[in-house]
Amino acid sequence: DAKTTQPNSMESNEEEPVHLPCNHSTISGTDYIHWYRQLPSQGPEYVIHGLTSNVNNRMASLAIAEDRKSSTLILHRATLRDAAVYYCILRGNSGYALNFGKGTSLLVTP
Amino acid sequence: DTGVSQDPRHKITKRGQNVTFRCDPISEHNRLYWYRQTLGQGPEFLTYFQNEAQLEKSRLLSDRFSAERPKGSFSTLEIQRTEQGDSAMYLCASSLTGASNQPQHFGDGTRLSIL
């Protein structure tokens, strides 16, 4: 699976929107973009995934660039419970393991 | 909603002892994965099962590690002759299929501490 690049950390104010970027310039046409997050002392939690079109669910929105070389996870109103490490992961047809990397550590301040 | 369950949540043992962890995946999920996570790092893949067949092992899985998934339901991960470097969080995940658009659902892990 192709690699992703994310900022090490980001900070947001509570109740503000958060845009978490991810670069994946070597993405292949069949790679899905997955986002997971990991709260302290918990296992990773699936957030959202997409292929080409933007996606929305109850947790977040995923905006995918037209050339698919980058994507952005959008939390519409950050809460203190959203403080976590967010991982952007590509999954292709031949892959089975999730390659987590180091992710982005999101700090939410009141 | 019964998610992935792991037992025990914490395990403290002396170096050289054997330990075994259990994972109960989400019912009817065919795929089961094991990952290991050390402090400050993202989880790293160890091995996975399709039903009862173990299909892939990472180079991280030394010969002291063995995993089973009898009858394609729960899985166990055993570490023999534990070493200090085995201290980590061991995470289990399951997915309905192995398709690239299928999310993996994780348990909260077993934290292993080697004295």
Image: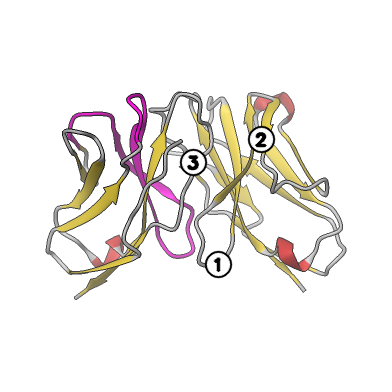
Instruction: In the rendered structure, find residue B39 and report the number of the disc placed on it.
Output: 1
Q: Magenta region: which residues?
A: A27-55
Residue B98 visible (yes or no): yes
Report the Cα–Cα distance between label 2 and label 3: 21 Å
Taking the spot 72% from the left edge, 61% from the top edge, the residue there is B86
Callout 1 amino acid: Leu
Callout 2 amino acid: Phe
| Label 2–label 3 contact, CB within 8 A | no
Residues at marks 1 and 2 on the same chain: yes
Taking the spot 46% from the left edge, 49% from the top edge, the residue there is A100
Residues at marks 2 and 3 on the same chain: no
**Crowd class of label 1 (few under 14; some 14 to 19; many from 20; radius 10 Å):** few
Q: Position of residue B113 (x, y in %)?
A: 70, 68
**Crowd class of label 2 (few under 14; some 14 to 19; many from 20; radius 10 Å):** many
Residues at marks 3 and 1 on the same chain: no
Taking the image as shown, residue B14 lies to the left or right of residue A25, namely: right
Badge 2 is on which residue? B74
